[in-house]
Image (cartoon, grey):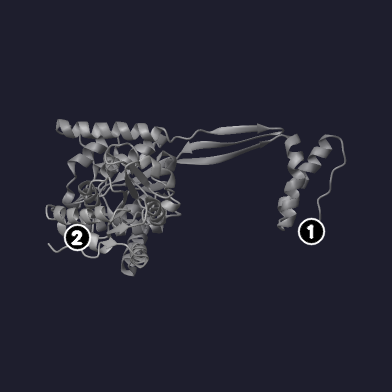
Amino acid sequence: MSELHNLILQTTAQINRLLRRLRERQVDTDPKIVDAVQKTLCEVRAKGDSAVRKFTRLYDGHSLSIKFPLPPPSPLDGDTERMLKSSIDRIRVFHKNQLQKSWTVKEKGAVLGQIITPLERVGVYVPGGKASYPSTVLMNVIPAQVAGVKEIALCVPTPKGEFNPVVLRAIQMLGITEVYRIGGAQAIAAMAYGTKTIKKVDKIVGPGNIYVATAKKMVFGDVDIDMIAGPSEILIIADYSASSELIAADMLGQAEHDERASSILITDSLELARRVKRDLEAQIRTLPKGQIVQRSLNSYGAIVVTKDIESAAALANTIAPEHLEIITERPRMILPLIKHAGAIFLGKWSPEPMGDYCAGPNHTLPTGGTARFASPLGAYDFLKKTSIIDFTEEGFLRLAPIVERFAILEGLEAHANTIRIRQALSSQERGGAARPLKDK
């Protein structure tokens, strides 16, 4: 195993090159992939189930029925059952705190407000095959259930027809009964457009490969989606007090996702930086995915040395990472300096995997700097808002001149006439003279 190269960065030029590399990870999708996904979407939209079955035979290697007949509940070993139950309970409690309520405000002559209602039908995509994640089931289904979504359809690819038993058990424990053993762009198309077997959904959530992500991007507008997730990221802010062994382990934990994952340490201690580099090289040798980890670190990893922790926080805000760990002597003193991050983990006892599985907050987070404007998946993503406007005659007459003038200024004469007609009606009912409509 060769050493990690050029990992410690200290100059502005080096840091700027790192930022450029991170931005380049977000380049447009290969046109060949875009074309392939577009053809899949069009074929499923035109041919429905027959196209879905065709692509499932081609990519998953089976001709089983699209809908998966859920077997009777079959508990796993005790430790796995307790693992799932504990995570389910914690995730549900956390997301219940995100619920919003309908509200109204009363003023003279008007009642204004907002009605909060859940989406009616949601589609959840769960990766299958080698990347089978029961945690994805929990993190995407539970917020929808908490929000009150009545219909949840779940798509899981099953290569050679095999269903991951822990994923299946998670589905059973959440009470989901509408499950389809399909994946890829064809699953996204089926949920977005509907087929004879699969009823169209209102929103699609859940991670997937580049084909799934591209398909979600293309169907947005026909349905809503959660986000377009990019390569995974972790950024760690640490000072002299931090353990280099822990930091190295946390960086490697993110780098093992794939070669495009990014693991970055920002510290004001050159000595810590050097120790972390040594620990990274030592720990890589013990990992089954050591080659993937090394390529990830050499391409998108870095140990950045700044003049102080305040500068480290400023650089972290520029990067706006998916996961941000703060491992300093007083982590909460740094927290007010952070403006952009998907999830923040404070102190050495809060490693990123705690958030992945059972802490409670959602692990579906904005990536690629989108934490500057995007939020983690939550119960609020499955709620929609409808405005309520209820004026009395008195309230209408008070604001009518303002509305009429706005309409005239914007050249919308028919808008203005809706106001004038009501002003005339009010005058008639009060015994006054009707106000004639203005000729154009």
Cβ atoms at labels 2 and 1 below 8 Å apart: no
Q: Earlier in the sequence, mark 2 or mark 1?
A: 2
Q: Nearer the viewer, residue 369 or 97?
A: 369
Q: Name the quadrant containing residue 289.
A: bottom left
**Relative side of 110 to 401, left or right:** left
Q: Where residue 251 sits in the image (x, y, percent)?
A: 24, 52
Up the image or down, 101 lies above or below 139; here it is: above
Q: Quadrant of the C terminus?
A: bottom right
Q: Nearer the viewer, residue 9 or 27?
A: 9
Query: What residue did someone put label 1 on?
Result: 440
Count of labels in the image:
2
Name the residue located 28 percent from the left edge and 43 percent from the top edge: 356
Name the residue located 14 percent from the left edge and 54 percent from the top edge: 282
Query: What residue did someone put label 2 on?
Result: 294
Q: Nearer the viewer, residue 18 or 424?
A: 18
The secondary structure type at the circle numbered 1 is loop
Sort mark 1 into few (<14), some (14-19) or many (20+) by Cα contacts within 10 Å.
few
Q: Name the quadrant containing residue 115.
A: top right
The amino acid on which the numbered mark 1 sits, given as a three-letter code, is: Lys
The amino acid on which the numbered mark 2 sits, given as a three-letter code, is: Gln
Q: Where residue 394 sits in the image (x, y, percent)?
A: 76, 35
**Relative side of 110 to 214, left or right:** right
Q: Where residue 215 sits in the image (x, y, percent)?
A: 35, 58
The secondary structure type at the circle numbered 2 is helix
Q: Name the quadrant containing residue 332.
A: top left
As measured in the structure, the alpha-carbon distance from the residue carrying label 2 to the one carrying label 1 is 73 Å
Up the image or down, 300 lies above or below 154; here it is: below
